[in-house]
Amino acid sequence: MTTSDIIAASAALIALCSFYVAKKQAELAREHNRLSVRPFLGIYRKEFGNHPIEYSVENRGIGPAVIKRFHVLIDGKEVIAPHGNYIHAAMDMLGLDRNEVSGHLLGVNEVLKAGQEVVLVQFPNSDTNKSLHKELLGKLPRMKFKILYESIYEEKYEYEGNG
């Protein structure tokens, strides 16, 4: 083996090592980019003081959440809503008056920005109507929400809970 062969082999080895380091660095950068825009949805129930009982969803992640599916569950079973309003169908299953509820149904491909909060269900009279308030506290624990959502990189996530 001549000196020039040793130099050529050393150069090839250095090039391979450099390629490996660059490839690993690109993989780490890609993973960092995905994590830096990860959404994190949570459902929060508010029932304090002189405010109506409400459930809201909030994106506490860093990136936007793209909603892919929104379910309401009663006793662990998905609410079927032939008329399209899952909240009203859930109220019917719980034996609650539909007129006592307002809210927002999350639509397919609806985007929740980082830090955005949306009220899903609110019972506007529950702060002043004490019998309604008591009835709701007895029945609402049976209700849960299930949200399937994605990051902008189309990574899939799921949240299930009721606050």
Image (tube, rainbow, N blue to C red):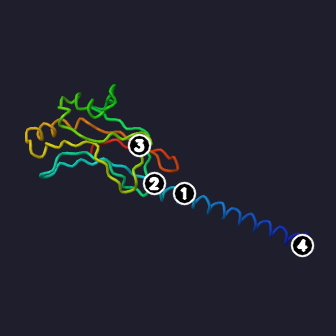
Q: Which circle, 4 or 1, is nearer the viewer?
A: 1
The CA distance from mark 3 to mark 1 is 20 Å
User: Mark on residue 31?
Assistant: 1
The type of residue carrying mark 2 is Arg
Marks 4,3: beta carbons within 8 A: no
Dot 4 surroundings within 10 Å: few (below 14), some, or many (20 or more)? Answer: few
The CA distance from mark 3 to mark 2 is 13 Å
The CA distance from mark 4 to mark 1 is 41 Å
User: Mark on residue 38?
Assistant: 2
Residue at 74% from the left image edge and 63% from the top image edge? 16
Furthest residue in direction top, as rendered: 82
User: In the figure, is residue 22 to the left or right of 112?
Assistant: right
Residue at 26% from the left image edge and 32% from the top image edge? 88
Residue at which label 3 appears = 158
Name which quarter of the figure residue 106 lies in: top left
Marks 3,1: beta carbons within 8 A: no
Q: Tag 1 or tag 4, which sits nearer the N-term?
A: 4
The type of residue carrying mark 1 is Glu
Q: Position of residue 161 (x, y in %)?
A: 31, 42
Q: Which circle, 2 or 1, is nearer the viewer?
A: 2
Name which quarter of the figure residue 19 lies in: bottom right
Q: Tag 2 or tag 3, which sits nearer the N-term?
A: 2
Q: Position of residue 145 (x, y in %)?
A: 32, 39
The CA distance from mark 4 to mark 3 is 59 Å
Q: Tag 3 or tag 4, which sits nearer the N-term?
A: 4
Name which quarter of the figure residue 4 lies in: bottom right
Q: Tag 1 or tag 3, which sits nearer the N-term?
A: 1
For residue 78, above or below residue 116: above
Say what secondary structure mark 4 lies in.
Answer: helix
Say what secondary structure mark 3 lies in.
Answer: strand
Furthest residue in direction bottom, as rendered: 3
